[in-house]
Image (cartoon, coloured by chain):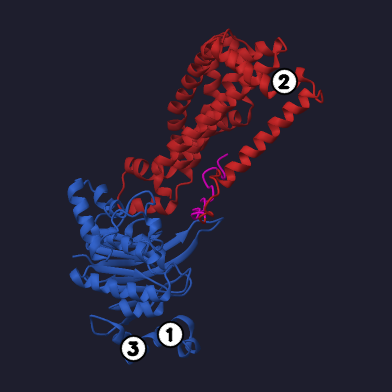
Amino acid sequence: MADITFDQVQISYAGKGEPFVAVNGFEAHVRDGEFVTIVGASGCGKSSVLLAADGLLRPSGGQIRIGEKIVNKPGPDRGVVFQDASLMPWRTILANVAFGLEMQGVDKATRLDRARHFIELVGLAGREEAHPHQLSGGMRQRVGIARALATDPEVLLMDEPFGALDAQTRELMATELLRIWDLDRKTVLFVTHGIDEAVFLADRVLVMGGSPSRVVEVMEIDLPRPRDAAVRASEAFGKYRTHLAELLFGAQAGAAVPS
Amino acid sequence: MTQGLRTRPPRPVAAAPPSRAVGLRWLPPVRARFVLGSLVVVLALWQLCASIGLVDVQFTSTPVAIVQAGGDLLSSGELWENAQTTLVEFFAGFALAVVVGVPVGMLMGWKLRIRQTLEPALIALYVTPSLALLPLVVLALGIGEASKIAMVFIEAVITIAVNAMAGIRETDPKLVQAARAFCASGGAMFGKILFPSALPTIMAGLRLGAGRGVIAVIVAELYGGTDGVGQLISTYGQNFDVAPLLFLTLVVGIFGYVVTALLRVLGTAATSWER
């Protein structure tokens, strides 16, 4: 079982004098195989919650569990995709994707085989020997996703992975991500500030708010899968979007949410 | 220290020049024409001023006399004999400086406690004109090769270590975080993230260190010794023999340039992913 439990999680930052409490009483449960997105205003600590779930950041209170295991450091059961891809510029795409397996001591032939498989899966076959600077932002994110998938984690943690991409590429990447996710339905926790993206991807949306912030609402997204452009254009999708915008920016903003 | 050293703006790829009209003879590329042109003009003016008595050849010599002196130094074997000594001293000192400076600098960049321990001494040495230590080094090691090797080492090792430290510390924290997320051990973090990331800056440090090392070996030989190019320069200076003096100075300059250029090529090869 690879469900994620957030139990009264508190996150604070050290500063001059009193530590600043950014997140307090964060309660959530992500079911095994579920796709959950977290939205919230910038600076609300949503990325910190995600990094804490990987053990890259230690909560100042509460507990995060993957299955029954308490998170205290990164582990092979989780894979992370970062906002800026964070690829090693001196490594080829192939070597970047194989990095996680290399760290796990998988022998070279096996890890390169697996890396090739995932590069093909994310649609970059033929670019194995390229270096990151030779790829576009969207392609680099594809590499980031392939790298996270290559170690076959049970949980995929995604920190605004499409945040720096242009709108068109972003929509395309969301559809691609769902296609890949649908193959084996890993548990996914996906942080975003994009309302469309949050609704389009998710089984459930966790809305963060307040100061210090916590989960203020959980939205069930009851839209058919696989999702495509038709789903995006549907009335139900629009309603979810409007509701989410109201939650985040207030009623007026909800009425005039930009598409 | 390292600012701007490895961040040369990428050279624009020159478009193929438009084909010239048929019948024109081949000309060197524009840049070479200007470089060669300025050289020829300066040398010609120099020679001319000297021959019409506008400058005192006792101090300036002339290009022709310098070339003649160079020919004499080469054919008598005097240059090569002394150059051998200087080369051995330089390369021994520089190799020692690389072997010590790179690991020490990287460790200082990697481990906070080591940095806190060694940084004050390193920075103090970095800002001290270490050539001022020459009399002390000669007292300790004599006027033979050992004191020259020591001076090259002292001059080069500090620059090399400071750059290696900076290279490690400039590593993108996002890459460190990503490596942690993929469960990189301490050794893997160093070998697979910090070291490759620091390599361009380390190579820049080697180039700078080599330049300082060339200065150090010549100055140390000028100060005292029985052979070496610096000692030759010093002897010709005392005899007021300007032409060979200038020729030898030119040789040292060319040597420094060649060593630095070789290290640049080596660095470019080692960090080919940058382009």
Residue A219: give x, y in percent of width and height: 33, 82
Q: Residues within 10 Å of mark 1 (few under 14, many from 20)?
A: few
Would you say A127 lies left or right of B155 here?
left
Q: Which residue is mark 3?
A: A233
Question: In the rendered image, which residue does mark 1 sit on?
Answer: A259
Q: Earlier in the sequence, mark 3 or mark 1?
A: 3
Percent x, y of residue B193: 37, 45
Label 3: element kind: helix
Residue B268 forms part of the magenta stretch:
no
Residue occupying the point 47% across, 71% down: A42
**The quarter of the displayed image where residue B237 is located:** top right
User: Which quadrant of the structure image shows residue A149?
Assistant: bottom left
Quadrant the C terminus of chain A occupies: bottom left
Tell me residue B118's x, y (percent).
51, 31
User: Disc 2 versus disc 3: distance between alpha carbons?
Assistant: 86 Å
Q: Quadrant of residue B143?
A: top right
Q: Residue at x 36, y 54 (%)?
A: A131
Q: Is residue B6 magenta?
A: yes
